[in-house]
């Protein structure tokens, strides 16, 4: 089974709800991907990571492809899906597993050309209606709580995650701004908990996040 199809099965719309969430790492915007390689390798070796969302600083196509190349084998050889933040046109050429898009317009434009071979996730969903449109438009997961502009209150993020997982089968990613939010997102039903570099660059913070997810399994 190819890496793309394996990861699509794990993160796609028919993924089973296993009773515990898995971690989803989010990189800082990268100009030189090598600056995070060691810390990312440590994180991938230290915890069960479902996916890594790679974000970029501006650059031309050749530069972006080179940045992906620096991290691709590291991420995929550790069993994690490599997702690009935007840049859907580079997914196949860069041998990635999929793309994360912001908003339903981007999702509708891209999903038909990439699915079912690649994972297509969607965030930037400000309303319940937006989230339902994303699900109807073929998103393999929806993300709530990411810090795009003004983040809603954490109580609002928890409410949205709980509502979604109660009703819909498409997996949900809850974005944890810090370690203290990880367990609450998992308890609300998120299949995946996204953590940015502030968490995974710190071995102690990453270990705490993984332990809080593991604790949900035995509840």
Image (cartoon, helix red, strand yellow):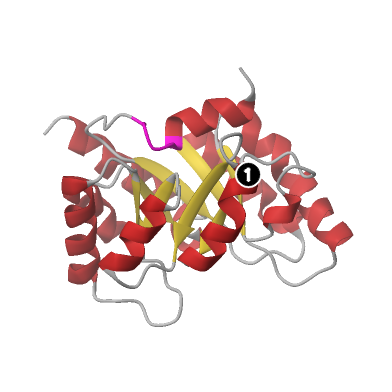
Q: Nearer the viewer, residue 79 or 99?
A: 99
> Would you name the residue on which mark 1 appears?
114
Residue at the outermost top position: 1
Residue at x 79% of width, y 59% of height: 64
Q: Could you tell me residue 178's position as x and y percent?
A: 34, 63
User: Residue 75 location in percent, x, y?
Assistant: 63, 38
Looking at the rendering, in which quadrant would you find the C terminus?
top left
User: Majority secondary structure of the magenta segment?
Assistant: loop
In-image side of 70 versus 48 (left or right) = right
**Residue positioned most to the left:** 219
Q: Residue furthest right?
A: 62
Residue 95: image location, x then y, percent: 74, 39
Residue visible at 29% across and 71% down in the picture: 127
Magenta span of residues? 11-15
Q: Image quadrant for the N terminus?
A: top right
Find out whether residue 52 is within the magenta segment.
Answer: no
Residue 129: image quadrant is bottom left
SS of the residue under disc 1: helix
What residue appears at the point 62 percent right and 27 percent down from the top-left corner? 3
Please indicate whether residue 1 sits to the left or right of residue 200 in the image: right
Q: Residue at x 17, y 69 (%)?
A: 155
The one nearer the camera, 61 or 13, is: 13
Residue 202 image offset from top left, x and y in percent: 47, 54
Residue 156 lies left or right of residue 110; in this view the side is left
| Residue at far bottom of view | 150
């Amino acid at each position: 089974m190819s890496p793309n199809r394996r990861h699509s099965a794990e993160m796609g719309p028919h993924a089973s709800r296993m009773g515990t969430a898995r971690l989803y790492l989010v990189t800082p915007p990268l100009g030189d991907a090598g600056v995070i390689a060691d810390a990312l390798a440590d994180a991938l070796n230290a915890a069960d990571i479902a996916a890594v969302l790679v974000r970029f600083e501006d650059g031309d196509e050749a530069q972006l492809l080179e940045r992906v190349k620096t991290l691709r084998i590291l991420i995929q050889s550790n069993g994690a899906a490599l997702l690009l933040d935007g840049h859907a046109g580079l997914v196949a050429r860069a041998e990635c597993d999929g793309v994360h898009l912001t908003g339903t317009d981007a999702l509708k434009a891209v999903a038909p050309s990439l699915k079912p071979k690649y994972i297509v996730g969607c965030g930037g969903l400000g309303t319940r209606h937006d989230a339902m449109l994303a699900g109807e438009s073929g998103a393999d997961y929806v993300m709530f709580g990411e810090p795009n502009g003004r983040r809603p209150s954490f109580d609002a993020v928890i409410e949205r995650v709980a509502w979604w997982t109660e009703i819909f089968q498409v997996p949900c990613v809850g974005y944890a701004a810090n370690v203290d939010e990880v367990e609450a997102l998992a308890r609300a039903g998120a299949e995946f908990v996204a953590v940015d570099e502030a968490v995974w660059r710190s071995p102690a913070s990453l270990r705490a996040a993984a332990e809080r997810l593991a604790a949900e399994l035995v509840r």
